[in-house]
Image (cartoon, rainbow, N blue to C red):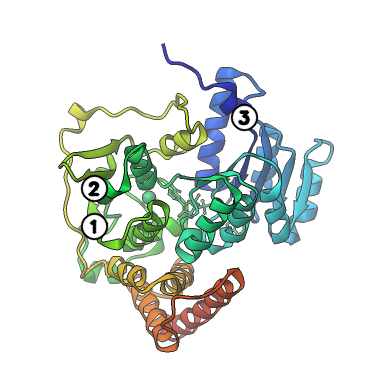
Amino acid sequence: MIRPPSDAVLARPVTILGATGSVGLATLDLIAEARARWGEDAIPIEALTARTSVDELAALAKKFRPKLAVVSDPSYRRALESALAGTGVEVAAGDPAVIEAAQRPAPWVMSAIVGAAGLEPTLAAARRGAAIAIANKEALVCAGDLVTAEVARGGGALLPVDSEHNAIFQALRDEDLDRVEKITLTASGGPFRTWTLAEMARATPEQAVAHPNWSMGAKISVDSATLMNKGLELIEARCLFGVETARLDAVVHPQSVVHGLVAFCDGSVLAQLGAADMRIPIASALAWPERTPTDAPRLDLAALRELTFEPPDPVRFPCLELARHAMESGHQATAVLNAANEEAVAAFLDRKIAFLDIPRIVEEALTAHAGVSTSDDIGGLAERLDLDRAARKIARDAVGLAAV
Ligand code: NAD
Ligand code: MG
C-alpha cells in the first residue's frame, strides 16, 4: 500500500512561473493527477504566469483556478482580461507583474521560465524564503551566486528539477560532500550524436529540436543538440551542489535511463534511474521532502536490455568545452556564455545562422569579453544584467556578420 503525501504537501500552495511551457505543463499534469486522487482542493495554486500564450494560460486558469494569472507581454493584457472575465481569477500583465507573482506567499514555486528572463522572478521568490523548484538553469548559469545567496538569506530551499540534478540531489541525501569523489551528469547526446560535422553544418531547426528521448521547449532542445545543455548543467551543478569543477563530469548515455551518478570515496556509486519523463523529477520536487505517486512510465530493464555510455566528442560538440572554460573563468564568463548562447540559439531557430555558427558566436563573445575584464567580482544584479546585455549585443553583431 503506497502512503499518500501528507497535508504538508497536499495543502501547500504553489506558484508556477512559465506555466505554459513544457516543464510548467508537466507540473500542472501532476497537480491534475493529485487532485484526481485526493480531491479538488489538493495543491492550491496562487499564480500562473506565461509570456504571450494567452489562450493557453486562460484555459489553464479556468481548469486549475489559480488566484492570479499573469502574462508578461503587456500587449496581451486585454486579451487575458476578457478571456478570464467573470471567473474570479485576478489578471495582471508586464514583467514587473511576473516578479510580483513570485513575491506572493506560495511556499513552493516552480521556476520554469526559459532563459535569463527567469532570474528576477526567481530571486524574488528566493528573497521571501520559498522552496524553489528550479528548472530555469539559465538563471543559475548567469547569476547562480546571487540566487544561492538570496535563498540562504531568505531561509528557503533550492530543489533541482533538471533531471540530472534531481538525480544527484536524491543520491546525495544525507551524504557528506567531502566524501564525494565525483558527480557525473548523463547526456543523451541529442539528435546529432552520430552525425558527421558536414551533416551538422546543414542541420535545420526542425532536426535540432527533434530530440530522441525527451519532449522539451525549443531552446533547451537546441542546447541538447549542441551539448551546450550539458555545459550549462555542469555550471548548474557547481552552483547547486557547491563542488569544484574537477569533481564534475559528463558522460553520453543515449538511452537516458540513468540520469546522474555520485561516486563516493569508498568506491560506491549511487545513481538515480527512471523513464525519460520530466514528471518524475518534478514530482520529487513537488512532494519534497516526501514522495507522491505518478502515472509516469515505469522502467523495464529486461526490455531495455542495454545501457551504454560513451565520452562526449569535443570536436563535433565544442560547446561543452566552451562551458567548462567559462566555468573555470568565473561568474562573469558564465553570464556571457549564457547570454551569447541564448542569442545564437534564437538566431538559429529564426534561420538567420547555421547550426555550427552557435559555438562560434558563443566563443566570439567569450573572447571579446575576456579582453575587457578578467575580474570575478561583478557585484549585484544590476551589474549582472549589464553584462548580459553587453554579451547579447556582441552575439547579435556576430549573428549579423554570420547571417545566411
Ligand atoms: P518552454 O519554452 O517550453 O516554456 C517556457 C515558459 O516560459 C513558457 O511558459 C513561456 O511563456 C515562459 N516565458 C518564455 N520567455 C519568457 C519571458 N521572457 N518572460 C516571462 N516568461 C517567459 O521551456 P521549457 O522547455 O519548459 O524549459 C523551461 C526551463 O526549464 C528552461 O530553463 C529549461 O532549460 C529548463 N528545463 C527544461 C526541461 C524540459 O524537459 N523541457 C528539462 C530540464 C530543464
Ligand atoms: Mg537536464
Callouts 3 and 2 close, C-beta under 8 Å: no
Badge 3 or badge 2: first in the primary sequence: 3
Above or below for 39 versus 303: above
Q: Nearer the viewer, residue 266 or 63?
A: 266
Q: Which residue is mark 1?
A: 193
Instruction: Please name the residue shown 65% across and 56% down the image.
Output: 52
Amino acid at dot 3: Ile
Q: Which residue is mark 3?
A: 43
Identify the image quadrant of residue 166.
top left
Question: At numbered mark 3, what does the secondary structure look like: helix, strand or loop?
Answer: loop
Q: Which residue is mark 2?
A: 254
* Front disc: 3 or 2: 3
Amino acid at dot 2: Pro
Q: Residues within 10 Å of mark 1 (few under 14, many from 20)?
A: some
**Extreme residue in the top direction:** 1
* Front disc: 1 or 3: 3
Question: At numbered mark 2, what does the secondary structure look like: helix, strand or loop?
Answer: loop
